[in-house]
Amino acid sequence: MDIRRDDLVKKRRIRRIIYIVVGLLAVASVTLAVSRLKPAPPSVDKATVWVEPVKRGPMLLEVRGLGSLVPEDLLVVSAPIDGRVARRLLLPGSPVTANTVLMELTNPAQDQAVVDAEWQLKAGEAQYTSMKAQLDSSLLDEKAKAAQVQSDYIKAKLNADRDTELAKRGLGSELNAKESKAEADAQATSNDIEKQQLTVSEASAKAQLDEQQAKVESLRAMYDLKKSQLDSLSNVRAGADGVLQELDVEVGQQVPAGTPLAKVMQPTHLKAELKIPETQANEVLIGQKASIDTRNGIVPGHVERVDPAVVEGSVTVDVKLDGELPKGARADLSVEGTIEIENLPDVVYMGRPAFGQPNSKVGIFRLDEDGRIASRVQVQLGRESVNAAEVLSGLQPGDKVILSDMSQWDAFNKIRLD
């Protein structure tokens, strides 16, 4: 009986070892199988992604930028001389004409300068009048002397003619005739000299008067300048028809000459100033068609100027408006502009993805036939427009792709759309 009991215990032990070995082998097999399984693709709500098909056909290449309406012609009104702002007569937004007074400035030193210039002008005019009287008196004396010399010459010539005639007839001596002729010749020379002297005196008098007159005109010009400066200071005018856009000074402010005081613009002459990203601005050319969205209507236009400089990652592009502005459009109004670069007649394209740059390779999720699984494929992009991107390789027309930002799924090559 003891022998039988030992055999039974031994058999139970062997059976237990076999069970343990089989269990370990089963666990190892399951572990190996699980480790070889691929992870299931994550689920993404289909309503949260942007899906569009790849197409083939014409693609309009455009660039877009934000900006504002700015005046084509802006007149800056500056202080003519130093002054202090005494009054502001208008506020920005007021319509003005060229003669509208915007503000009044004062400068006591300029008031005194006008008075001094006026007195200097009056002194110069008085000096001219006095000089003219003196010269006229001297010329009268010269003319009287010349007249007397001419009279003496005429008398001497008459005497000489008389004595010569008497001598010919034998009624007078030849000596008297010769003496009379000599006297007449001497008087003729004196008469010529006196005429020349009178001519020189008249020319000298004219030169002196012209010189003094020039001084008077110079003093008058200085007085007119000082008075004009005072008037322009006391009555700062708009200088052009339009709308007062800005007043850059306050009452009581001291302003040096040349300080900008106000800006006047013509509200009907506006252009759009757009900021185009520098990566898209290299194909913008003068003359290209554009459209400006004012939020109250779209106005056609064309590119008028492209700034050669890049400022904070963007290029300034001026668009001249070819159509009428809608009501309410004014300077500094925020606008959005679209510029037509080129019309590509036959290309493979898709909607512009939320990621990727022009002429770069990006990973894009492409849907399978049933639209439930999306796999990542490498796509070579070409040129990009506002709402479209050219596909050079990696996709075919008819493929459906996800264009929304999928950066949170970068660790997966497949996703499931639920």
Image: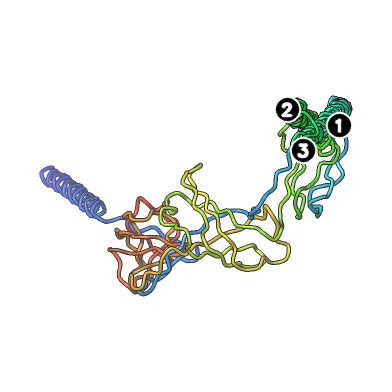
Q: Work out whether residue 382 or residue 326 is closer to the camera in this orientation and state it.
A: 326
Q: Dot 3, crowdedness within 10 Å: few (<14), some or many (≥20)?
A: few
* Residue 222 in view, yes or no: no
The residue carrying mark 1 is 106
Q: Which of the marked residues, 2 or 1, is nearer the chain's N terminus?
A: 1
Q: x and y percent of residue 296 in the render?
A: 67, 66
Q: Which numbered mark, 3 or 2, is in the foreground of this view?
A: 3
Q: Residue at position x 42%, y 65% from top? A: 61
Dot 1 lies on which element?
A: strand
Which residue is most to the front?
A: 170
Give the distance between the C-alpha atoms of the residues marked 3 and 1, in whole angstroms. Answer: 94 Å
Q: x and y percent of residue 402 in the render?
A: 41, 63
Give the answer, above or below, for where 351 lies relative to 116: below
The numbered disc on residue 169 is 3
Give the answer, above or below, for where 113 lies relative to 96: above
Q: Dot 1, crowdedness within 10 Å: few (<14), some or many (≥20)?
A: many
